[in-house]
Image (tube, rainbow, N blue to C red):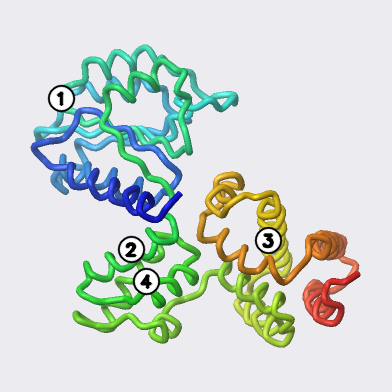
Amino acid sequence: MNVEFLHRSWMRVLQFWKQIKKDQLSPVYLLTGTETYLMEQSADKIIRAALQEEEKDFNLSVYDMEETPVETAMDDAETLPFMGDKRVVLLKNPSFLTGEKKKEKVEHQLSRLEQYINEPAPYTILIIQAPYEKLDERKKITKLLKKKAAAGEAKPLSEQELIQWTRSLAAAEETEIGKEAAEHLIALTNGSLMMMDQEIKKLSAYTGPGGDLSKSLIDSLTARTLEQNIFELTSHVTGRKTDKALHVLHDLLKANEEPIKILSLITSQFRLILQVKQLSSEGYGQPQIAGTLKVHPFRIKLAYQQTGAFSEDELKNLMKELAEADYRMKTGGMDKVLILELFLMKLNRQGVHY
């Protein structure tokens, strides 16, 4: 998948947002994809185009399809708006659009939804949020929605798109951020669009209009997530820098992070490194690995950068060590902090050659 295509993918999101205008709203919207922030942004833009802020209390209804029958929501959709021209009905978690085989808490009369989609109320905007990677195209209701609804995708952004997104956020705040600084912010926020949005606003407020969001400024003002600290810790491990790894560990402990949670995240990171190494050796490219593992492409890139520090056998042995450390923690055979410290020191001393 080339960069030009990935940029076109992001441009489709922007184009969808531009089409959301008060006098051109579609009666039914279908939002799909696993990038929660983009999906919520799309829904919010539709709602704000349809309703004034003071109308939301009366004319905005949100239904969780895991808790409420769809026919109840359709009854609401066919109810005239109160003190306004439009009503918005938002459906969340419509798992009946997927091929998932699970016992539903409620039974849905999908024929009622099909009837509505074919003849939607002229005063209602129906938004269906389907936070899934793909829908079951064989189902009648899915086919109908694909045909009748205005569709918006909320797919995870590629690395290049994340950089583009970050720079556009800064531009909206009348500040600038360079490519290297943008990459650093993405790493610190673990590619979270919501966190990047919040951090860009904070950094821009600090510098004021015309400010430069430099890497050093980002380092000094951006709080690191637990996951980012774990990535930094594992980076020190791969570089055989035990003193720095222990320093990060002790900072986490001072912040009252639980040792067993720290160990779990370390294990998760090294498991990802092993999986990336195995799939890479089988000829998979990074985009394919991200799709196969269902992990954000940026995390795959970072994990790939760490694969060169270990052979596959070393990583497998390391996973065994982590499993044993987890067992010792849960059985109370040794102090939990000491278990983590000994694990990091053993790695440096033996270089994971067991």
- Disc 4 marks a residue whose amino acid type is Glu
Q: Secondary structure at mark 3?
A: helix
Q: Which residue is mark 4?
A: 199
The image shows residue 111 at horizontal and vertical percentages of 37, 12
Q: Quadrant of residue 310?
A: bottom right
Mark 1 or mark 2, whichever is nearer to me: 2
Q: Which residue is mark 2?
A: 164
Q: Secondary structure at mark 2?
A: helix
Q: Residue at x 24, y 25 (%)?
A: 77
Q: Is residue 170 above or below residue 250?
A: above
Q: Is residue 223 above or below residue 16?
A: below
Q: Which residue is mark 1?
A: 80
Q: Which residue is mark 3?
A: 273
Q: Earlier in the sequence, mark 3 or mark 4?
A: 4
- Disc 3 marks a residue whose amino acid type is Ile
The answer for how far apart the CA atoms under marks 1 and 2 are is 42 Å
The image shows residue 346 at horizontal and vertical percentages of 85, 78
Q: Quadrant of the C terminus?
A: bottom right
The answer for how far apart the CA atoms under marks 1 and 3 are is 55 Å
Q: Earlier in the sequence, mark 1 or mark 2?
A: 1
Mark 3 or mark 4, whichever is nearer to me: 3
Mark 4 or mark 2, whichever is nearer to me: 2
Q: Are marks 1 and 4 in contact (CB under 8 Å)?
A: no
The image shows residue 57 at horizontal and vertical percentages of 22, 42
